Image: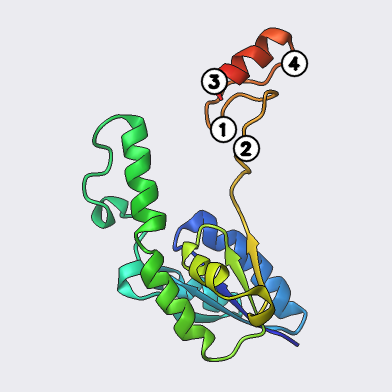
Amino acid sequence: MADVLIPLTPIYGHVVPLLAIGRGLVARGHRVTVLTGRKYAPTVRSSGIRFRPLPRAADFDDDDLDGWLPGRGRGGRLAAGRHDILGLFLAPLPAQHAALAAELRSGYDGVLSDAAYLGVLPTLLTVPAAERMPIFGVSATPLSLTSVDTAPFGSGIRPGDSALMRLRNRHMN
């Protein structure tokens, strides 16, 4: 039986899919703890999983992103997207990392991290693999790679296999 920590960005689309994995681990006899926003405490606990809260500096309500990120939607779509990505994922990194480091002192056999929980990066980058517990990343979001065979991720443009479509994709990417 393993003791697994699952740190999650407190956004519904990141929490719920990984809770399904956590429930599967619990059903197989493992002890699972989720580190995420307080809003999700009842959902985590009702899944038979131990809950640990993120510190306030990393805990936000995904139903009130304007309250967490004043100035959302200003500027063009790219500026607004950049603002949200920096505010939701990058800015919480130091507090996420501190919470992860503190929680790991409790003793775990491994970490199954939401790929958007960037607080795991300092550990991955500074502790040699041979000296740290296993850390696995899981993404609940679509893979967003560029390819001559597809239009840019999120563009909503349908794929095509003609030479003209491939040229379009190469140019757009």
**Residue 161 circle label:** 4
Q: Position of residue 127 (x, y in %)?
A: 57, 76
Q: What element does badge 1 sit on?
A: loop
Q: Residue at x 65, y 82 (%)?
A: 131
Q: Nearer the viewer, residue 164 or 23?
A: 164
Amino acid type of the residue that numbered disc 1 sits on in the rendered structure: Phe
**Residue 167 circle label:** none
Amino acid type of the residue that numbered disc 2 sits on in the rendered structure: Leu
Where, quadrant-wise, is the N terminus in this rendering?
bottom right
Disc on the earlier residue, 3 or 2 = 2
**Residue 145 circle label:** 2
Q: Nearer the viewer, residue 20 or 118?
A: 118
CB-based contact (under 8 Å), mark 4 and mark 1: no
Side of 20 where 46 appears, left or right: left
Q: What element does badge 4 sit on?
A: loop
Whole-Å distance between the Cαs marked 3 and 4?
15 Å
Q: Residues within 10 Å of mark 3 (few under 14, many from 20)?
A: few
CB-based contact (under 8 Å), mark 3 and mark 2: no
Q: Residue at x 39, y 57 (%)?
A: 90
Disc on the earlier residue, 3 or 4 = 4
Q: Residues within 10 Å of mark 2 (few under 14, many from 20)?
A: few
Whole-Å distance between the Cαs marked 4 and 1?
17 Å
Q: Position of residue 75 (x, y in %)?
A: 25, 32
Q: What element does badge 3 sit on?
A: helix
Tag nearer the camera, 2 or 4: 2
Q: Residue at x 66, y 29 (%)?
A: 147
Whole-Å distance between the Cαs marked 3 and 1?
10 Å
**Among the 4 quarters of the image, the one containing residue 89:** bottom left
Q: What element does badge 2 sit on?
A: loop
